[in-house]
Amino acid sequence: MSHKGHGKIEQTAQDAAADLAEAMPPGTVGLSKKFYEKELDRLQEELVKQQYWIKEKGLRVVIIFEGRDAAGKGGTIKRITEYLNPRGCRVVALPAPTERERTQWYFQRYVPHLPAAGEMVIFDRSWYNRAGVERVMGFCSEDEYQEFMRSCPEFERMLVRAGIILLKYWFSVSDEEQERRFQARAHSPNKRWKLSPMDIESRRRWIDYSRAKDKMFAYTDTKQCPWYVVNADDKRRAHLNCISHILSQIPYEDVLPEPIELPPREDNQAYVRPPINEQTFVPELY
């Protein structure tokens, strides 16, 4: 598939990196807010162009976000979807399975959420729950776990053979950075909801989750459906790097519609609006 703007995107990213190297002295950690916001705005505009292309060509896209708790998956998803049309881009974050769902074929609860033509679906956590939290916390049996490891690569190859574009991202965060973010969440009323009992338990079982992730990669990091690891210790870099990678993995052309010329508003002087004091307004406290 041709991509009229893809080479330009890569070159622009290289230019941005060069500008960053000049603007920030050696050893500087993190991106400046000004550079980050400018580059994010550019990448988000490209995501909009990509979405128009996905719709025009009837592509079906699935993007999976997995990783450590507090690794920044949710923040990245927010930046990706901020300006996209929600009719064509859905975020799926399923709750714990019901008693009935636990008796179904494991992948059954995820299949109804797969995209139709022209759609992108982002899984904030996915069928990989079985290889992670369910394995570590003992929510599945050994037989169920082993069957998942055998069937998952086949399931994903089926999706790819059916024409679905599947991207899998693992957000990697260091033990020290995760602890810092956990402490920030624990002490902030605005963020405390992000810490579930399961998250707190995952903090204690860091090594168990590391083993589970390594084994998951050994089975499911396949040639047809590879894992892409995002270094997420620096949230701003993680946002930009992940979005840039998504843009590079789904070739597209700029098919944005032309600017819209709005017609003049109707001037109906015969219409008389009701008295304004008949309406109830929100108190203007600010």
Image: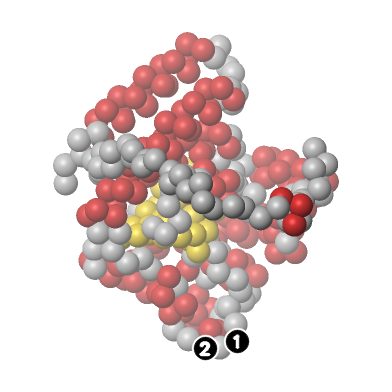
Residue 197 at x, y percent in the picture: 75, 64
Q: Residue at 40% of width from left, 74% of height from top?
A: 111
Q: Please count the marks in the image.
A: 2
Residue 148 shows up from this direction: no
Identify the mark at residue 213; answer none if there is no mark.
none
> Please, what is the three-letter code of the amino acid marked with disc 1?
Glu
Q: Residue at 62% of width from left, 42% of height from top?
A: 174
Q: Which of these two is toward me, 34 or 110?
A: 34
Q: Is residue 205 left or right of residue 172?
A: right
Residue 205 at x, y percent in the picture: 69, 59
Residue 10 at x, y percent in the picture: 31, 29
Please give the residue where the numbered disc 1 appears in the rendered image.
99
Residue 220 at x, y percent in the picture: 39, 61
Bin the neighbour count of mark 1 within 10 Å (Cα to Cα): few under 14, some 14-19, many 20 and up: few
Residue 137 shows up from this direction: yes
Please give the residue where the numbered disc 2 appears in the rendered image.
103
Q: Secondary structure at mark 2?
A: helix
